[in-house]
């Protein structure tokens, strides 16, 4: 059985949702393995032996690790084509991968600069500046995602949510920690609420015990 190493509210939510969709569509179950990032469980020698980056998500397939969201999503889609996680037509699939890669390699690391600036500099004044500047950038990234979902009907790729929907939910949720009020992105907020209500997503949310709105109103 596939194992998913995940942390509540982290980017591992993306494959977490996908594995719930796969379970619903194919009956194939997975084994969730909670990694408590705040307790440093991603840095134990056992975990680092499997993923030297000390991060989630990590899939374990027959005891072999697979890391990096884009690779994990590609693997799950190819292994379970009947789950319909990505469009099957070549060009549409490439466009979907392009958007997924952008969320993973552009929007996501921008947020990391806000949430974990100490990863990029040990200078405290520089950390404060990284947070300020990247929070502004991150808002622009959320606006791009909001633009992408304007034709979602009801989800990014149609009838069922997939990787993109889960990533959009996660990025908007993270926005609250960057001081971005989800009410200031009403279309994206309405979309994320719709995504959250889908049964596979709701199951992942319940296991992670998270809520969409993390924004602290003044
Ligand atoms: N490029 C990686 C990013 C993974 C990542 O940033 N994971 C974060 C959670 S969202 C993490 O595990 N952080 C813990 C740490 O760095 O200590 C991927 O696509 O999987």
Image: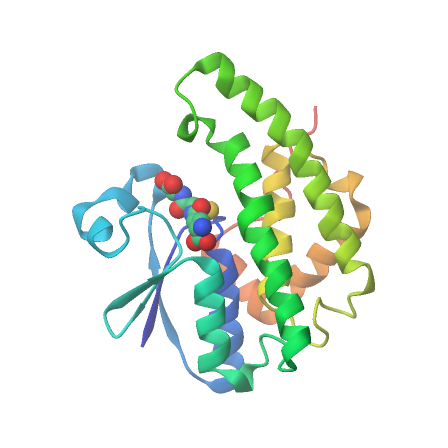
Residue 83 visible in the displayed image: yes
Of the pair 76 and 21, the residue shown nearer to us: 76
Q: Image quadrant of residue 149? A: bottom right
Q: Report the side of 210 relative to 46 (left or right).
A: right
Q: Quadrant of the C terminus?
A: top right
Q: Report the side of 209 relative to 177 (left or right).
A: left
The x, y position of residue 48, in whole percent, is: 23, 49
Residue at position x 42%, y 15% in the image: 123
Residue 216 visible in the displayed image: no
The x, y position of residue 50, in whole percent, is: 24, 57
Residue at position x 65%, y 46% in the image: 172
Name the image colouring: rainbow
Q: Report the side of 144 relative to 49 (left or right).
A: right
Q: Quadrant of the N terminus?
A: bottom left
In the rendered image, the vertical position of residue 112 relative to residue 34, given as above or below: above
Of the pair 213 and 47, the residue shown nearer to us: 47
The x, y position of residue 200, in whole percent, is: 56, 70
């Amino acid at each position: 059985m596939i194992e998913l190493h995940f942390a509540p509210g982290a980017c591992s939510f993306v494959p977490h949702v996908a594995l719930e969709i796969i379970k619903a569509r194919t009956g194939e179950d997975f084994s969730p393995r909670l990694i408590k990032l705040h307790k440093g469980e991603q840095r134990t020698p056992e975990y680092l032996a499997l993923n030297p980056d000390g991060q989630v998500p990590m899939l374990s397939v027959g005891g072999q690790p697979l890391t990096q969201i884009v690779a994990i999503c590609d693997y799950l889609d190819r292994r379970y084509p009947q789950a319909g996680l990505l469009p099957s037509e070549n060009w549409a699939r490439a466009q979907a991968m392009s958007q997924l890669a952008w969320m993973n390699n552009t929007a996501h690391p921008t947020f990391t600069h806000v949430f974990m600036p100490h990863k990029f500099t040990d200078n405290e004044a520089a950390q404060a500046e990284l947070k300020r500047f990247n929070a502004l950038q991150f808002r622009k990234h959320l606006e791009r995602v909001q633009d992408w979902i304007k034709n979602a009907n009801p989800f990014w790729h149609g009838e069922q949510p997939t990787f993109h929907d889960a990533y959009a939910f996660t990025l908007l949720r993270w926005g609250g920690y960057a001081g971005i009020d989800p009410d200031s992105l009403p279309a994206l907020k309405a979309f994320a609420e719709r995504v959250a209500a889908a049964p596979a997503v709701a199951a992942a949310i319940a296991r992670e015990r998270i809520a969409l709105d993390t924004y602290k109103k003044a």
